[in-house]
C-alpha cells in the first residue's frame, strides 16, 4: 500500500488512477513488443475445465490464497486485465468504495474462487482482488471450491495454452495411456496430437488384423507404447534422429517420413539408415 496522506478518500482515488495508468501502460507495452493478444486476458474458467476435462469438485471452505495464483474468472466481463487492473472507468465508483474501506481498516468479506491445480478462478470478488493488488497485498481470504480435472493444469499460463491441453485430452481419450507411458508422450504443437492419434489407431487396426482378434483401446494403447513407441524412439536416439524435439515429436515425424519415402510400416536398422541418408538434417524442420 502506498503511504497514506491522511485523507483516505483521496488515497483511494489515487489507488484507482494508479491502477488504471498501470493497465494502459501494460497494454501499450504489449503492443510495442508484439506479444500475443491473450497475455493480458484472464483465463476463462469454463474453457480451462473443458480443455482439461471435468472430473468432480468439492468445497474446502475458507483459505488464504496468494493473489498471484488468481489467473482467471467464471465471469466473462472484460472490466479487469490479467493483473486485475481496471480496463475502464466504469468500475471506478465501486472500486474506490472498496479501496476506501480497506484504507480505513474495515473488514472486507472473503472472495469466492474455484481452485484447479494451483490456479484460482474468481466466482465473486473481482473488485476486491483488484484493490488488493493495487494496495500491494500478496494474499487474500477466499472461500475455495476445488475442481478436479482429467489432465494436470500445469503449464497453463495463457488462453492459447488451452488449445494444446484440449488436443491432448482428446488424444488420451482415443489413446488412453496411463502412468509413465502417459507422461512420456508430449507434443508442443496441438495438431500433432490429432495426427498421432490417427497413427496409433491405424497401428492398432493393423495389429488386430494380424492377430485376428479384438483388443480394446486401453490394451492397444499400452501395446503401442511398449512394442512400437519405446523401441522405435530408442533406435531414433541411437541414430541421432531426435534432435531438440520430444521423443513423441521425433517418432511422429520419422514415422510419416518412413512411409512417404520407403512405403513400409516396419522398423529396423535398414529403415533408420535409409531415413537418415535421405535427409541431411531430418529433424531440423518440418517438410
Image (cartoon, rainbow, N blue to C red):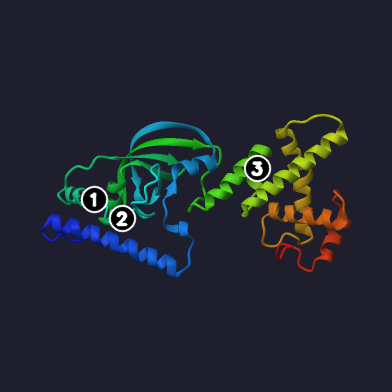
Residue 248 vs 226, above or below: the answer is: below
CB within 8 Å, label 2 to label 1: yes
Disc 3: CA contacts within 10 A as few (<14), some (14-19) or many (>=20): many
The numbered disc on residue 107 is none
Q: Position of residue 161 (x, y in %)?
A: 53, 52
Residue at 76% from the left image edge and 53% from the top image edge: 234
In the picture, measured across the screen, residue 23 lies left or right of residue 229, that is left
Per the image, the residue denoted by label 1 is 95
Q: Position of residue 241 (x, y in %)?
A: 76, 61
Q: Mark 2 to mark 1: distance in Å?
A: 9 Å
Q: Earlier in the sequence, mark 2 or mark 3?
A: 2
Residue 1 visible in the snapshot: no
Per the image, the residue denoted by label 3 is 171
- Residue 202: quarter of image: top right
- Quadrant location of the N terminus in the rendered image: bottom left
Q: Position of residue 44 (x, y in %)?
A: 44, 46
Judged by depth in the image, the label closer to the viewer, 1 or 3, is: 1
In the picture, measured across the screen, residue 199 lies left or right of residue 278, that is left
Residue 210 visible in the snapshot: yes
Per the image, the residue denoted by label 2 is 86
Residue at 71% from the left image edge and 66% from the top image edge: 284
Judged by depth in the image, the label closer to the viewer, 2 or 3, is: 2
Q: Mark 2 to mark 3: distance in Å?
A: 39 Å
- Residue 31: quarter of image: bottom left
In terms of secondary structure, where does tag 3 sit?
helix
Q: Earlier in the sequence, mark 1 or mark 3?
A: 1
In terms of secondary structure, where does tag 2 sit?
loop
Disc 2: CA contacts within 10 A as few (<14), some (14-19) or many (>=20): many
Q: Earlier in the sequence, mark 2 or mark 1?
A: 2
Amino acid at each position: 500500500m502506498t503511504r497514506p496522506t491522511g485523507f483516505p478518500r483521496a488515497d483511494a482515488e489515487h489507488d484507482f488512477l494508479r491502477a488504471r495508468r498501470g493497465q494502459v501502460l501494460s497494454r501499450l507495452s504489449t503492443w510495442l513488443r508484439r506479444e500475443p493478444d491473450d497475455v493480458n486476458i484472464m483465463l476463462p474458467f469454463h474453457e480451462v475445465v473443458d480443455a482439461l476435462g471435468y472430473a468432480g469438485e468439492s468445497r474446502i471452505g475458507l483459505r488464504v490464497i496468494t493473489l498471484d495464483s488468481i489467473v482467471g474468472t467464471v465471469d466473462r466481463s472484460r472490466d479487469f486485465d490479467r493483473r486485475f487492473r481496471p480496463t475502464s472507468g466504469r468500475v471506478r465508483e465501486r472500486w474506490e468504495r472498496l479501496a476506501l474501506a480497506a484504507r480505513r481498516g474495515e473488514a472486507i468479506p472473503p472472495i469466492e474462487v474455484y481452485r484447479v491445480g494451483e490456479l484460482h478462478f474468481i466466482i465473486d470478488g473481482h473488485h476486491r482482488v483488484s484493490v488488493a493488488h493495487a494496495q500491494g497485498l500478496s494474499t487474500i481470504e477466499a472461500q475455495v471450491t476445488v475442481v478436479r480435472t482429467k489432465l494436470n493444469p500445469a503449464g497453463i499460463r495463457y488462453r492459447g495454452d488451452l488449445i494444446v491441453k484440449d488436443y491432448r485430452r482428446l488424444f488420451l481419450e482415443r489413446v488412453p495411456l496411463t502412468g509413465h507411458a502417459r507422461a512420456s508422450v508430449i507434443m508442443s504443437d496441438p495438431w500433432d496430437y490429432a495426427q498421432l492419434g490417427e497413427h496409433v489407431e491405424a497401428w492398432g487396426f493393423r495389429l488386430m488384423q494380424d492377430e485376428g482378434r479384438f483388443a480394446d483401446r486401453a490394451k492397444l494403447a499400452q501395446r503401442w507404447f511398449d512394442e512400437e513407441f519405446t523401441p522405435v524412439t530408442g533406435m531414433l536416439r541411437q541414430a541421432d534422429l531426435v534432435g531438440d524435439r520430444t521423443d513423441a515429436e521425433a517418432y511422429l515425424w520419422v514415422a510419416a517420413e518412413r512411409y512417404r519415402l520407403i512405403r513400409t510400416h516396419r522398423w529396423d536398422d535398414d529403415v533408420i539408415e535409409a531415413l537418415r541418408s535421405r535427409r541431411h538434417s531430418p529433424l531440423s524442420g518440418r517438410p
